[in-house]
Image: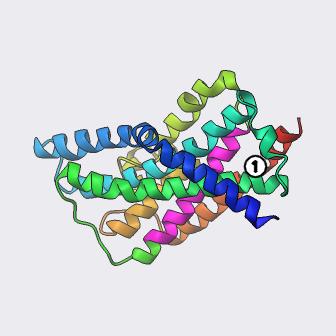
Amino acid sequence: MNFTTFWAMLSRDAHVARRNFVTLASQTLLQPMMFVFVFGRVMTTSGLMAEQYKALLLPGIIALSMVFTGTWAVAMPLLAEFQFTREIEDRLLAPMEMEWLAVEKVVAGMVQALVSGLIVIPMSWVVMGGVTLSADHLTLFFTLAVLVSLLASSIGLALGCSVGQQHIGLMFSMVLAPMIFFGCTYYPWQALSAFPILKRLVLVNPLVYASEGFRSALVPAFPHLSRAVIVVSLFAFDALFLAVGLRQFKRKALT
């Protein structure tokens, strides 16, 4: 692989992201911040929800922001480059293996997902009026952040190379929306105990492990999945979506 070419493409994507920062931030952070304000501020201030709910909510919002940002940052440019602008044809002429072009997209998406996660923490803290978080598991938190950012960008790679332009709307309504609402972002996995079938079905949703993972690192007093299960599952989902994404990218590029 030509590392100079790889770095040049990564720098270009970073420049484009910086130039479109306001647009990207509004697209990816607006929905999480609305949920934070409604559930974390309005509902708790009015007394309809306990103050402790703010701490339960924040890890899920971090997971949601990272997954949504990373997926969007990779999937949407790929959809445009493959099906509208055809810009991908010029990139495929770069002096490096085809698969590394896809890896560059994934790394760029990871960076954006990590930045989103870091931004949403202070923003949510301010919007909700202060949240008590644990600092006892920072190593676990940063490890999970890397795994979740890779998950998000790998999902974006797989979707961006698999969805046709006529199915973009379906991608969000049939894939991303169910992921969000059944991803334990607004409630812990244990809250589904009254729905035993659903409780097991949601375990195929990778966002569950992202939300529960951040919950186990930042608010360990709340119920959460086993940390070992979370880490192993995230590794497995990362490998699965990355493998599918690379295969679909190569197939799409050769057609």
Residue 149 within the magenta-colored segment of the rendering: yes
Q: Amino acid at mark 1?
A: Val
Tag 1, which secondary structure?
helix
For the C terminus, the quadrant is: top right
Question: Residue 90: where, in percent of width, then height?
Answer: 80, 41
Which residue is farthest right?
A: 254
Left or right side of 183 for 120? left
Please give the residue where the numbered disc 1 appears in the rendered image: 244
Question: Residue 24: where, in percent of width, then height?
Answer: 46, 41
Whether residue 202 is visible, yes or no, is no
Left or right side of 56 for 190? right
**Total residue callouts:** 1
Which residue is farthest left?
A: 46
Q: Residue at x 63, y 58 (%)?
A: 107
Asked whether 155 or 215 is in front, the reply is 155
Asked whether 66 or 84 is in front, the reply is 84
Q: Residue at x 44, y 59 (%)?
A: 212
Left or right side of 186 for 157? right
Residue 134 within the magenta-colored segment of the rendering: no
Left or right side of 245 for 235? left
User: Is the residue 110 above or below the residue 85 in the image?
Assistant: below
Whether residue 251 is visible, yes or no, is yes
Is the stretch drawn in magenta largely helix, strand or loop?
Answer: helix
For the N terminus, the quadrant is: bottom right
Q: Which residues are magenta?
A: 141-161
Question: Residue 223: where, in percent of width, then height?
Answer: 35, 62
